[in-house]
């Protein structure tokens, strides 16, 4: 099984969309193995978005992600990164397909509802950054026999 990192951003938390988004994730078959509501410390935000430090939107991004709580989570499935990226939709909600989280719930790039790791390597890095090993659960759901061959 593969794990990936997802973060419901402040705009979605403030719009009371945590349940809606988690419901979509679970209905797809992704298993939540870790989750927490938290206010992001400045240092964590800067480390998470360090690849964007030289870009003009960096300061606004840090300000936004630390402005209100987020719901950080780790999900697990076969091909979890690809599947989660597919249900999240394109970064720009106006280009995201209807039926995706961003396509249905987002309006602008700067307030695009959710973050998802873009590769297995990024997922491993982000999971380690946001979660301690003891905050993640290893368990088997009975539905897994109905999801995987």
Image: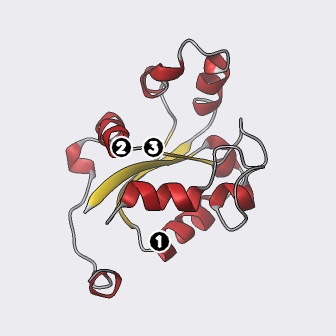
**Residue for point 29% across, 41% down:** 124
- Residue 123's tag is 2
User: Image quarter for residue 142?
Assistant: bottom left
Q: CA distance from mark 2 to mark 3?
A: 7 Å
Q: Are marks 3 and 1 in contact (CB under 8 Å)?
A: no
Q: Is residue 98 left or right of residue 89?
A: right
**Residue for point 50% across, 76% down:** 27
| The residue positioned farthest toward the top in the image shown | 54
Which tag, 3 or 1, sits closer to the chain's start? 1
Q: Number of marks in the image?
A: 3
| Residue 146: % across, % down | 33, 88
Mark 3 crowdedness (10 Å alpha carbons): few <14, some 14-19, many ≥20? some
- Residue 26's tag is 1
Rendered view: 83 above or below 4: below
**Residue for point 37% across, 51% down:** 4
Nearer to us: label 3 or label 1: 3
Q: CA distance from mark 3 to mark 1?
A: 19 Å
- In the picture, the quarter occupied by the N terminus is bottom left
Rendered view: 39 above or below 102: above
Residue 114 visible, this orientation: yes
> Quick one: 30 or 92, which is closer to the camera?
92
Residue under label 3, please give it: 118
User: Image quarter for residue 20?
Assistant: bottom right
Nearer to us: label 1 or label 2: 2
| Residue 81: % across, % down | 40, 54
């Amino acid at each position: 099984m593969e794990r990936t990192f997802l973060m419901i951003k402040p705009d979605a938390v403030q719009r009371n969309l945590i349940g809606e988004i988690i419901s979509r994730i679970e209905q797809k078959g992704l298993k939540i193995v870790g989750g927490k509501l938290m206010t992001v410390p400045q240092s964590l935000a800067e480390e998470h978005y360090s690849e964007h430090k030289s870009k003009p939107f960096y300061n606004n991004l840090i300000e936004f992600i630390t402005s209100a709580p987020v719901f950080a989570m780790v999900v697990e499935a076969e091909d979890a990164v690809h599947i989660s990226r597919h249900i999240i939709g394109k970064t720009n909600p106006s280009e995201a397909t209807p039926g995706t989280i961003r396509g249905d719930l987002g309006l602008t790039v700067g307030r695009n509802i959710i973050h998802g790791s873009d590769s297995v390597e990024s997922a491993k890095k982000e999971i380690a950054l946001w979660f301690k090993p003891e905050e993640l659960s290893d368990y088997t759901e009975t539905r897994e026999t109905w999801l995987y061959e």
